[in-house]
Image (tube, rainbow, N blue to C red):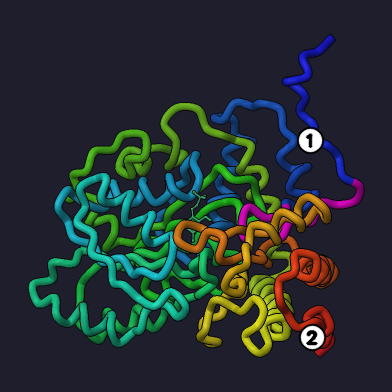
Amino acid sequence: MPDASLRMTPTRKPGRHFFANPGPTNIPDSVLRAMDRNSMDFVESDFLEIYDQARAGLKRLLFTEHELFFYASSGHGGWEATMVNLFSAGDKVLMIGGGYFPNTWAALSRAYGIDVETLEVDWHEGVKIADLQARLEADKAHEIKAVCVVHNETSTSVALPLREIRAALDAARHPALYLCDTISSLGCFEFKMDEWGIDVVVGGSQKGLMLPTGMAFSAAGPKALAAHAKATLPRFYFDWTAMLSRRFRSFTGSVPIVPFFGLVESLRLLEQEGFETVWARHHRLAQAVRAAGHVWGGGNQGPTLYCRDPSRYSDSVTTFEVPEGHDAERLRKVLLERYNVSTGGGLGALSNRVFRIGHMGDLNEAMILGTLATVEIALGEVGMPHTKGGVMAAMESLAK
Ligand code: PLP
């Protein structure tokens, strides 16, 4: 008899598992098929071709001509690799606060002895550009070596205006590097590294790129590579200098080939649909989620959109703050266990206070409506106050 503890298949529930998480996201069937690969020698020309295609395609999506480094890691590894390659112990960086991810990025940097100053902001709105500019202007000695920004704060669903942040750096005539986490925005809404003057980007595989978790990357421009040349934090596996000296750029030792087959296919899908069409689809679906949210939370009785600045609504995730005295986790539990719908929970300080609907990646109108309808049923079931009719509003938004 096989050991029951080795059983691999989770208990099956009928129908499709609806995955409305803000990353990881649904993986298209063709991407799954593309990754169904046996081992091959990673120095074979067949693989080199795949690697080069993945690299070139990802640079097109990032709208960059700069260097690209891949990491066999999740997004956290991407941050770590980036920080150790750019800084020395004691260097000061300015972290733009506003949610769980800047806090974690700051903690990681501090673990390496980087002096992190966080620009605290209202999490419901994100940084005020004037405050950022004022802080940079006050730094007459240019002690701040970098400004670190999370483009799309996945915990709060506040998306920051990256062009305006560049303009603030320029207006303050501040030479700091501009670092941007694009983990939950890339492949979902507009992002243009070179045009927007971003020096370093950190990305991950499991969101807009529609791949499993486990591959991260960063792109770095000339100013970043110059900083790297002087940076003394310890590094080995993730050392950009070593990576630049190799045909593969990345990876000391064996190359994880499978994600690259997936990446080539996911980039093919994105390019076939067209980047602008992909962004427009995300916007359309996001608007439908927000339309439902505005109805549910009408009169501030029900769950309300956490982001309070409509110009900063995220097109890849919507965070809902539940009414005082109610538990977001109870709602999520009912959604998952009774309806087989997975949503995102609150992270860190927002734990129990919010639930999140991810609308990124391989998603269409029917999937969004199915999720919203089920959320509306579950809101009633757990007795969370809300105004009915959110799904109707979403339908009307999509029918426009
Ligand atoms: N940055 C942002 C904006 C994210 O949304 C996430 C994950 O959700 C991360 C960083 C961390 O990435 P990972 O979970 O792959 O380590």
The image quarter containing residue 140 is bottom left
Q: Quadrant of the C terminus?
A: bottom right
Whether 330 is drawn above or below 238: the answer is below
Q: Earlier in the sequence, mark 1 or mark 2?
A: 1
Magenta-colored stretch includes residue 25 = yes
Identify the amino acid type marked 1: Pro
Residue 63 visible here: no
Q: Which residues are magenta?
A: 14-26
Identify the amino acid type marked 2: Ala
Q: Main secondary structure of the magenta part?
A: loop
Residue 141 lies, in percent from the top left, at 8, 72
Residue underneath mark 1: 10
Residue 102 visible here: yes
Residue that protrudes farthest toward the front in the picture? 325
Q: Nearer the viewer, residue 254 or 335?
A: 335
Left or right side of 132 for 220: right
